[in-house]
Image (tube, helix red, strand yellow):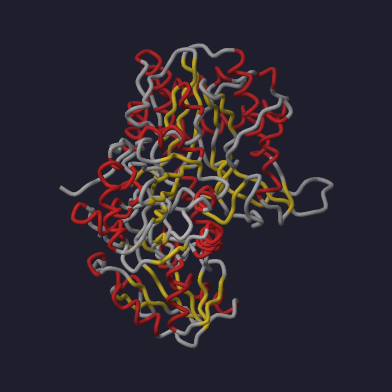
Amino acid sequence: MRQTFDEATDPSFGRKHLPLLRARMAEQGLDGFLIPHEDEHQNEYLPEANERLAWISGFTGSAGAGAVLTDRAAVFADGRYTVQVRAQVDADQFEILALEDNGLARWLEGAPRGAVIGYDPRLHSPDTLAGLKAAATRAGAELKPVQINPLDLAWGDDRPDQPMAPVVPHEDRYAGESAASKRARIGKAIADKGADAAVLTAPSSIAWLFNVRGGDVIRSPLPLAQAVVQADGSASLFVDPRKVTNELPGWLGDAVSVQAPEALDGALEGLKGRRVLIDPSLSSAWWFDRLTTAGATVVRGADPCTLPRAVKNAVEVEGSRQAHIRDGAALTRFLHWVDTVGQATLPDERQVAEALEGFREQTGALKDLSFDTIAGAGPNGALPHYKPVTRTIRRMERGSLLLVDGGGQYLDGTTDVTRTMAVGDPSADQRRMFTLVLKGHVAMAVVRFPVGTNGVQLDALARLPLWMQGFDYDHGTGHGVGSYLGVHEGPQRIAKWGTSQPLLPGMIVSNEPGYYRENHWGIRIETLQVVTEAQPIAGGERPMLGFEQLTLAPLDRKLIDVDLLTPDERAYVDGYHAQVLAKVGPLLDGEVRDWLTAQSAPL
């Protein structure tokens, strides 16, 4: 029986699988081996066949790394997965360390002098690899590329098959622009970069550019494929023939050649003497090495699809609005369930997550979740990206809080929303902290900002009410979101650190300040919003941008301390709730509609 993974992966994996890997390492003359979470496509969410870190360690988080030496091993996870990694990984087999602050590189600095540590160049970006090589050099060790991944050999026949989901058209009524028009735009962008062609390896770029979707990657409708796009807009798409549906060649048109992956090597050889654009943050080191070997001149630069994909056209924005109305009705039914059935029966976190998914499925339009639902009761809510796993599951507790973060994939849009709910009567302290978070959330919702402003410049607005009381949160305030694509999408974000990319009309970002009291409870309020051109400000001199709220789901009134809100903040909350009732209310009836009406009454 082939091995599969879920959030409750067996912690004994390390004890069973480390000897198998070490035997294969020895056959290749290796003293160690590096195991990034990322796969050949640098995916955040992986098909089961590429869950290498999960196979060796049991850890299934969406960010992490592993390192195995002959006598010791380590797993690295970021702060989102502090509880999960300790629940899933055998601490007797692996040292559990922080991924942040170049954790893997710092660990390599302690590698044995003279050690030969292998890596698979298909799994590491060139910039990340450069840092790891420098760390190994400082330790007197050597990083050596492998031709055949020893972990894949150790996994053997138990490894799941690579996914073969059909690649299907994503109709123009959802995409808003034909693939031919997109290819012409991208071809010009390639030429403007001084390149003759571009190599695309990011599944989201493939899906967007060719107006196709797939099912190879969990929680994202992505096909695993590669493409070479010429400056004239023609392209070659390399995809397993088993994924090619009868309608696909006609959909793509004569200017796109559909070829098997085996033809890719020859296509790269054909780029000899040409200037080829490729993104070092999205493509692995193997591509850079292979293009150089083929005699191409590598032009390092951003994937030319990244920014156009992030700036949604009018059809995509309207699709997102409709997806959020539909999703908002499901969310409202769920919030009513929490406030009635949940308060009476105190379900556990897994039951809470299953209830939310069930309401989304009842829409009849759900294609998948956009990520595994985060449902944190009490202390688990204080872990920003906690996911219910068998050894840590808690029940809702009266006097505490429930934090639920989830989203859906629909043909017309991708959703992501967090709501925090009181279980029983909230304390004054809980209401105070929720309202401080709400004040920051409102500030980010109503802000007007000049053209050219980036998310780093806005981030402090959401934190200021917390800062003024001596509090903060350790994650970003907002991430980009795709259009029936990934729930995390660049280049835009709102955070203390990161990109200088200005926010542009049509970009969708989250607004999710929070507060987390360790060992007690957590608070986060998240809505998605789209950048818009703001109405001119009387007496103003410069064109301004703002945000339109997309997410439509009520806030928990019991947690709002109205006395802490300014009149303008109170007016915003009342206006937002009126909008929820107007747009979502017609999709509801009976006691759920009555409940929403009561929740939406003016503060």
Does residue 312 appear anywhere in the picture? no
Q: Identify the residue at the far bottom of this view.
A: 273
Instruction: Using residue 271 as the reference point, say whether residue 161 is left or right of it.
Output: left
Instruction: Using residue 50 as the reference point, say whether residue 105 is left or right of it.
Output: right
Quadrant location of the C terminus in the rendered image: top right
**Picture coordinates of residue 284, whole percent (x, y):** 45, 65
Quarter holding residue 326: top left
Q: Identify the residue at the far left of this view.
A: 1
Q: Residue at x 32, y 47 (%)?
A: 56
**Picture coordinates of residue 142, whole percent (x, y):** 47, 63
Q: Residue at x 61, y 22 (%)?
A: 602
Does residue 145 appear anywhere in the picture? yes
Which is more toward the observer, 246 or 402?
A: 402
Which is more toward the observer, 575 or 421?
A: 421
**Picture coordinates of residue 150, whole percent (x, y):** 30, 59
Which is more toward the observer, 79 or 321?
A: 79
Compared to 42, does 404 lie above or below? above
Q: Residue at x 27, y 58 (%)?
A: 24
Compared to 399, does 199 lie above or below? below
Q: Identify the residue at the far front of this view.
A: 113
Which is more toward the observer, 349 or 86?
A: 86
Quarter holding residue 344: top left
**Picture coordinates of residue 27, whole percent (x, y):** 27, 62
Count of numbered labels shown in the rendering: 0
